[in-house]
Amino acid sequence: MSRLKVLSAASELYPLVKTGGLADVTGALPGALSGLEIDVRSLVPGYPSVISALEGGETALSIPDLFGGPARVLAATAGALDLFVLDAPHLYDRPGNPYTQPDGTDWPDNAFRFAALAKTAALIAEGAIPAFQPDILHVHDWQAALAPAYLRYGGKGGAATVVTVHNLAFQGQFPAELLGPLGFPPEAFSIGGVEHYGMIGFLKAALRLSDRITTVSPSYAQEIQRTETGMGFDGLLRERAARLSGILNGIDTGVWNPSADPRIAAKYSAETFDARAKNKTTLQEIFGLDAEPGALVVGVVSRLSWQKGLDILAEALPVLLGEGMQLALLGAGDADLEARFRVAAEANPGRVGVRIGYDEAVAHRIQAGSDALAVPSRFEPCGLTQLCALRYGAVPLVARVGGLADTIIDSNEMALAAGVATGIMFHPGTRESLELALSKAAALFRDRDTWRRLQLNGLATDVSWRAPAKRYALLYRELVAERSTASGATA
């Protein structure tokens, strides 16, 4: 079997730059693919945190003018990652996170900042770096999604293309008058090109023009083809259904490993599970919760947003507290939700602990110390926190949507009797349904043998990248074979 070369283009890459699960996926998948005869190079913008982490590096490509200034592509490594870094200081050498200014507002030139990422990916896919001619260009989310359009309208051809949609809600819509400045001909502004409801649609371009579309769970791949959950793309996705598939995410089980995790208070495994109790005690201390070993601690690690259903959780707090539970929440997002949880913590000292922001170490401690991990999302393409929860023995309490439905076995009567349940699901995504799920969790927690079985079932679940990586490898090879067949037919 010949080795394939894949160029992965994304705006985030763990551990170099991360605002959410996208970085975890793009950081872990290359390593999982390496054992499957696939070499991955990851193209990422040269944010300050990325540039400072590089080990060595040499210029592989110079671009005299990339949307207002010179740029170069550095070939480098960082840990186990093989990188192409787009060093364009006029676009990326600035404070804030990848998308927003320090005051939280979007950078006004985001259209050009991420078009630059996509344009560079297309150049490499066309063969601009002879030492690395990719067979596949794999772009992630809207920030890299113009790359297939640059290939289509550049006229040179290049690698076969795959787009992965990590969250259809984030689409990358920009004014139509940017078409020329972004480097596209007038004919690109059409329903078959980059036009989307009168604007330039970055994600739409990839959904229309990529050779294959993937999303991060089979259920989400079905959900986004429905009018009520397709966010304006359902018709296009139904049209391209034969080229659309859902491949579940995994997690990096080296980073997320309770038997070797340096961030937690006590390491443990299925064989030494009683050692996990110290992590609960430590978590209660960190969040100012009462030191009650018998209280069910519900953890949350999440963006605070409508999508994530955290407003429903806020409404259900009286039931959570009434069942004798405690809440340890880490997250940031909507100002109103941040305020609601702060008020709840002030009103319920020792019962509700809240940290606004994100802290990787604290996220690990929540997974290791919580009894249950709540993910009440209204929609969830895949979700990674519930996979981490399984790995750490925190019982997932989740809405039955998207990847949550695909990764958790509900503790219904039959699953409990068969000894295969791993979590608690609720549907629909309402306060009343969540309240019933919380009460069910409290009842199951009182049966310590049953709760321990749920926890150990979670630890035994394979949440690694092994199976998903094989599916991506198969998809890549199918695309290469299709290209080869098509070339033979036209020769």
Image (cartoon, helix red, strand yellow):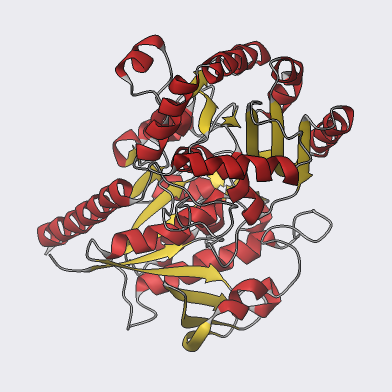
Instruction: Find residue 37 and report its image quarter.
Output: bottom left
Query: Could one spot residue 25 in this view of the protein?
Result: yes
x 77%, y 45%: residue: 356
Q: Give the camera-side residue of 163 and 459.
A: 459
Left or right of 342? Residue 488 is: left
Instruction: Find residue 19 and report its image quarter.
Output: bottom right
Instruction: Find residue 459 and report its image quarter.
Output: top left
Task: Please state the total of marks drawn on the protein image.
Answer: 0
x 33%, y 83%: residue: 130
Left or right of 134? Residue 326 is: right
Residue 214 picture location, percent across and down: 38, 44
Q: Give the camera-side residue of 198 and 26.
A: 26
x 68%, y 51%: residue: 175
Left or right of 251? Residue 347 is: right
Residue 245 vertical position relative to residue 226 in the rendered view, above or below: below
Residue 33 vertical position relative to residue 421 in the rendered view, above or below: below
Residue 379 vertical position relative to residue 363 in the rendered view, above or below: above
